[in-house]
Amino acid sequence: MANHGQFSGCTISSRRCQCFEKLSEEETIQLNHNSVNIKYKKGEIICKQGGFASHVMYMEKGLAKVFIDNGVNSLVLKIIPDGNLLGLTSLSEEHNTFQYSALAYIDSEIKQIEINFFKQLLNRNIDFAKEVIDILSSNSVQVNGRFFCLTHKQSYGRLADIILCLSERIFKTGEFELPLSRKELAELSGMSSETVIRMLKNFKDEGLVEMKGKNFKVVDFDRLRRISETG
């Protein structure tokens, strides 16, 4: 992926989980015995902030938003595609509840792994543990970059970030079917739906993107990256 700025506001988790590749054959069999796959429909809550964390969750396929809220306002921390873990912040004895909520943007499939078994793997497999630490580190860097974007970038830069992230990290192509509504795009970029609709029209009029219904095409990556960097 092209690096669009030192502090990328990209919401998409770019660090795919490779920790399960570090397991022995026996550990993999044990993992299957201590996990179950659950399917979630679009719009379903995968985990609830404040709920007791009995499992660590792995996104087998799908797309979900991770967010925190206080009952009135909410803030999207990141979007997780295939190959990402949920619930790592609940592994410590101090935090045994989910520190955020997650909601399926599209139909998704999650592997729920019994949390005590996951902790056992951390204790006895150093390569597995190192990979999980790397994931936590990447998550921290990503969230820091997102907060910088939301507090210091102008609206055009924030929207450019979202478009670039969807194109380069999720779909890995310039032309795709957008799974998010204009309201959800607004939520990600910290703006109103009206503002996002107006800005998308401006992007279209300026030849940066093309839109037809849910079909979305990035026409000028270079100019979008410049907007992201200077936005």
Image: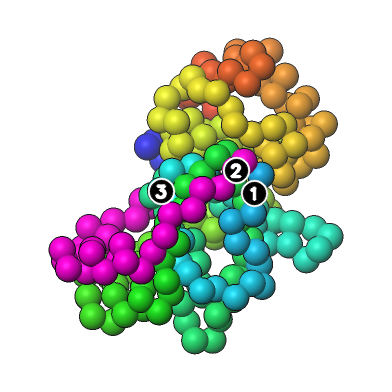
User: In the structure shown, which secondary structural element does the residue marked by tag 3 occupy?
Assistant: strand
In the picture, measured across the screen, residue 79 lies left or right of residue 32, that is right
Which corner quadrant of the image does residue 213 belong to?
Answer: top right
Which residue is at a point 79% across and 35% down the rendered structure image? 193
> What residue is rendered at 40% in x and 30% in y?
172
The percent position of residue 83, horizontal first and vertical second, equals 38, 49
As drawn, the label of residue 44 is 1
Work out how far the residue at label 2 is from the one at label 3, CA to CA, in angstroms: 14 Å
Real-space CA distance between mark 1 and mark 2, rounded to the nearest whole angstrom: 6 Å
Residue that carries the numbered disc 2 in the rendered image: 41
**Which residues fall within the magenta stretch?**
14-42
For marks 1 and 3 on the same chain, the one whose residue lies earlier in the sequence: 1
Amino acid found under the numbered disc labelled 1: Glu
Looking at the image, is 160 positioned above or below residue 210? below
The question of residue 151 being in magenta is answered with no
Q: Name the residue under label 3.
A: 60
Horizontal and vertical percent position of residue 103 = 62, 51
> Which residue is at a point 37% across and 37% down the rendered structure image?
1
Residue 30: percent from left, percent from top: 26, 69
- Which residue in the rendered view is the most extreme toward the left? 25
Q: Classify mark 1: residues with Cα within 10 Å, few (<14), some (14-19) or many (20+).
A: some
